[in-house]
Amino acid sequence: MPAPRFELAPQYDPRAVEPSLYRRWLERGAFAPRASGEPYIIVIPPPNVTAVLHVGHGLNNIIQDVLIRFERMRGRAALWLPGTDHAGIATQNVVEKQLAAEGKTRFDLGREAFVERVWAFVRETGDTIIEQLKIIGCSCDWSRTRFTLDEAYSRAVREVFVTLWEEQLIYRGHRVIHWCPHCLTALSDEEAEHHDTSGNLYHIKYPLVDGSGFVTVATTRPETMLGDTAVAVHPDDPRGRPAVGKNLRLPIANVEIPVIADETVDRAFGTGFVKVTPAHDASDFEIGLRHRLPMPLIMREDGTLGEPSRVDGRTGRRPETTTARPPDRPSARRVPPDLEGLDRFEARKRIVKQLERDGLLAKVEQHQHSVRRCYRCETVVEPRLSDQWFVKMRPLAEPVLAEYRRGAFRLVPERWRATFEHWMENIRDWNISRQLWWGHRIPVFTCKHCGHQWADRTDPTTCPECDGGGGPVEQDPDVLDTWFSSWLWPFATLGWPQRTPDLERFYPGHTMVTAPEILFFWVARMLMSGYHFMDRRLPFTTVYLTGTVRDTQHRKMSKSLGNGIDPRDVVRLYGTDALRWTLIGGGSLGADVIVDPNDLETTFAPGRNFANKLWNIGRFILSQLPAEVTPIDGVDRTQLTLADRWILSRAQAMTREATASLEQFRLDEAAKRCYEFAWNELADWYVEAVKPRLGTTTDAGAAPRAAGALRAAARGAAPASAAHAVLAYCFDVVLRLLHPVVPFITEELWQKLPGRTADELLIVAPWPRPQGQLEDAEADVHFGRVKTAIELIRSIRAEYRIPPKTRLRATIVARGGDRAATFAGERDTILRLGQLESLTIDGGPAGASVGGGAHAVFGDGSEVIVALEGAIDVQQECSRLSHELSRLDGHLAGLAAKLTNENFVSRAPAEVVAREREKEKAWRDQRAVLAGKLKALGCS
RNA sequence: GGGCGAAUAGCUCAGCGGUUCAGAGCGCCUGCCUUACACGCAGGAAGUCGGGGGUUCGAAUCCCUCUUCGCCCACCA
């Protein structure tokens, strides 16, 4: 009787093992890709440095960690490349908010000091984020950590900009863009999100100059009327005929504007007349171009009314240098002094009131429509005519779409296909300039002397065109959209544009795991930049679009909603493995995961409980195993018991199924399959069945109660060494398979298995392969019978409320030869787990014996009779059995209907019919036994 | 306006053509501190698989439709 090799506490304490294990992985360089072998690469979607992570981000990163650990164990040179994103607007907003709390604006600090301040902020949050990723167990190669504003990374951004410039894919566009009056910057189409809103549709009368009446227009934004330069009507609309060509007097602004005909006007909407505000509406801008209308801006950048021809008092910016161009400035003032400086929504009210007073407000209707809001601050976006830098997207998108259609990469789940294709087909040019300070400065330079404008890879001091002139050179004051740097992530992180060894080895990558929200912002653009700049090689082959973590009200988890859970809190309370277990097991592929921020216990306890279960399985197994255990392939098959063969066979099934699930990104399925094996097969059955064979102290105390079992052990029915080998093998396999999901508890236990050398790590141990020679269908069937016998006995015991200490006598009447042998072979197991005093195995026929016992019939017609010494109530027994009989009759009736149905027999596949016939036969047998039983008992 | 997804036990979710497939975890009920584990063990109760129609020999599982929720896209002035 060997002394236990380990003394483990009965309860697993993750806090005691996780940090040191993580450190050990780091010290051993386990996160770095193997020096050789087929690479497998995931680049992390770099978290924004705006705030610390919450559990929502955790899901994404844990999925990546599971995949990377899986492939690492499969022998790939796995690289998970980490980093963070400078997140232009978002970060600038956060720091500006901090400044506001100090009563300052960024203009008080000035550009340089402000940027310095942001740097200080992002260093701090960036560090916290990396810490959080480590705490949740992410096995990133930290030595390759990147930041989108690093110097090296910035070179890539600049290279890309200049190259696109040279390819004439970047151009200066003069058009109506989305402007955020709060962030004071232009936005891309993707950054202006639609929000359904209920508002008003105002019908406003514009008087005809000739006094012949009015034209009534309908608008949701009366405040923009000051910028109207026409009213349009569909050319075929009869209502328009009298008016087209005439002039209107625009109320309040008091200028004359024409009525024009334009085919884009929807005759069914509103009054049929639409006010045209070319500088504040994208479609009106198009009309304005067609009709050569003036395009006055009547709003300042901060959303107050006013002509932006002066320096803006709040922003300090001279609008004409970056947005409005002189020709668009109105020739006459349109904003009356009483409206000047009013916020646009305030102005809307004021204007409506004035129109009403003047009798020009025809009516106001309730109106459902969609309003665009800034994706960072939710301010209603103001369409605004301005000059911005754009990327021509169609030439970039078209080849990627073609690649997608020929299967060069795929989206999982597949259902995103339509959305993706639609966006790619209708792609629009990308506004990449932002009027911010935090970001990559746009490398466009203008010569003040000759006006020459160019993009440059280095900072020029003189104009290349007129260097004789030697005038000052000025850089564009704006910065690039933050996505203009992140879209280069899969190769800029590897050193591009230099041809570094990393770039050679780790581009292209494989799996991109990210949230569907940024499919267009980021994923689509990465595919385009990768294809364009990396010799037509796409950056990854699979895009795994994850679900979203939401609360019980299905609201997205977010800091601002207050439903965010800090992963550090969960880890502290339940451990990292518990967190990972809940997130991985919580939802299937691409499905949302619902967690309750108000009930962490219910949410995370299952994972903690499972970790504890593993711990205790380990505690038991490790206490039993000698220092040396025979490897499973070294065990003589003839020394294996039925239970051994069964669990070994189950282990093969698990290995096959869990691996297949992981390959299909069904992480939840894989996790649950291993859970079932560990808990329901290994712990509940095998460990219990094997105990007497281990010949340790374990069963000593139970000797008086399980005398039969111990005698059997003493007889040496099967050597303990075989049991040791089976236990060690099964536990080893399940720990390996579970490692990607719950890396800490598995690593901790695995290292304690016999035969492990001090420097072996599970994280880089080989992934198990199913061993065909251990698959054993017969054992599955036979041990299944044993389990059923025990379950029936237990069930009878509970139904008759027999105290657990009472040992019972039971008889099994086995139908058919090998059944009796099965039961006889596992007699000891049945005795122990059924808490029996004695077990008689009767070769049949079934249904004959009655006795004073309780009866149960197997699916195959075998039966169990538990002697209850007259303690049983015949009435109750009859009702139990007849209940069972009627249930069976129900099934049989259904089957009979099917089998007598000519259509079924002739049309269903022959094998299905055959299977149903066999089933029917078995049930009839079972029924016959049951009926005989009822008769013998004299039930009515 | 267009597209997509979800609706299965009290809760969170699996199952997505073949009657032991109506499941799991949590919760609930009844017993158990059976020396690996009470973060546990054993035994239970619990759902006409959102409504309606259809296809099929057979539907929770496929099709149509309706309802409710969620998401994405959209020049609804």
Image: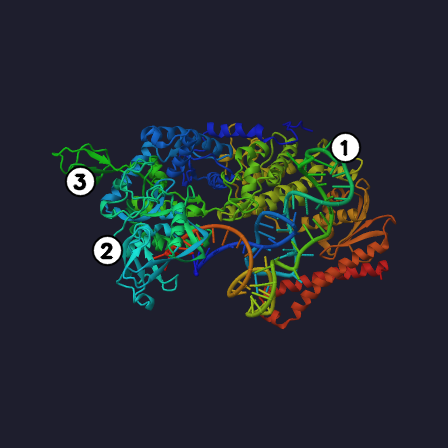
Secondary structure beneath disc 3?
loop
Spatial separation of the CA atoms under disc 2 and disc 1: 99 Å
Dot 1 amino acid type: Gly
Q: Quadrant of residue A461?
A: top left
Q: What colouring does the structure picture have?
A: rainbow
For the question of whether residue A538 can be seen, the reply is no
Q: Nearer the viewer, mark 2 or mark 1?
A: 2
Q: Is residue A572 left or right of residue A856?
A: left
The crowding category of the residue bearing disc 2, from other C-alpha atoms within 10 Å (few below 14, some 14 to 19, many at least 20), is few
N-term mark: 2 or 1: 2
Question: What residue sits 26% from the left and 38% below the top?
Answer: A476
Tags 3 and 1 on a common chain: yes
Residue A122 against residue A779 in the figure, above or below: above
Q: Which residue is mark 3?
A: A451
Place of residue A262 in the rendered image (x, y in percent of width and height, measured from the top left): 29, 62
Measuring from the top left, give residue A236's x and y in whole percent: 31, 68
Under tag 1, what secondary structure? Answer: helix
The disc labelled 3 sits on which kind of residue?
Answer: Gly
Q: Is residue A879 above or below residue A639?
A: below
Q: Circle 2 is placed at which residue position?
A: A292
Comparing A598 with A278, the one in front is A278
Residue at image position (42%, 47%) is A542
Chain bearing tag 1 is: A
**Does residue A561 appear left or right of residue A850 in this picture?**
left
* Residue picked out by circle 1: A701
Tell me which label, 3 or 1, sits earlier in the chain.
3
